[in-house]
Amino acid sequence: MGDEQIPTIGRCHACKRAFRFNPATVTTAMIDPETGLLPGMTVLGTVREPTAEALARSVKEPICPDCVKRASDFLHPPALQFDAWPRGNPDRD
């Protein structure tokens, strides 16, 4: 019972909504507070090698389960389903 952590209410870095989480088990991302982005990510969305300064000043920010699910769905989209073309009557065509 002494090992249980008290849930915390915090703000998701991605969607900015408040949510309740356990600090020991929540998904986090290292965010550079100067840019508000992941270290090494540019404003255009490209990735480069992060600088040592950016890594040193980065802090862990919580990400809510909804945003984690959306990111997972984006990485692994469902396969496209195509309907079959309607066939005409072969006697008439």
Image: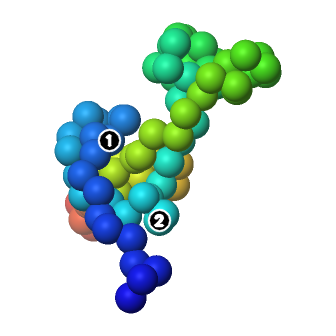
Amino acid on which the number 2 mark rests in the picture: Thr
Q: Residues within 10 Å of mark 2 (few under 14, many from 20)?
A: few
Name the residue carrying label 2: 25
* Sequence-wise first label, 2 or 1: 1
Question: In front: 72, or 64?
Answer: 64
Q: Is residue 10 above or below residue 7?
A: above
User: Which residue occupies 26% across, 34% down?
Assistant: 16
Quarter of the image with the N terminus in it? bottom left
* Left or right relative to 41: residue 26: left
Question: In front: 81, or 22?
Answer: 22
Mark 2 vs 1: CB contact within 8 A? no
Q: Is residue 46 above or below residue 1?
A: above
**Secondary structure found at label 2:** loop
Question: In front: 61, or 7?
Answer: 7
Quarter where residue 30 is shown: top right
Name the residue carrying label 1: 12
Quarter of the image with the C terminus in it? bottom left
Which residue in the rendered view is the most extreme toward the bottom?
1
User: Which residue occupies 46% across, 80% down?
Assistant: 3
Amino acid on which the number 1 mark rests in the picture: Cys
Viewer can see residue 93: no
Question: In front: 58, or 15?
Answer: 58
Residue 22, image x, y percentages: 37, 64
Q: Residues within 10 Å of mark 1 (few under 14, many from 20)?
A: some
**Secondary structure found at label 1:** loop
Residue 67, image x, y percentages: 35, 48
Which residue in the rendered view is the most extreme toward the left?
18
Viewer can see residue 86: yes
Residue 92, image x, y percentages: 24, 60
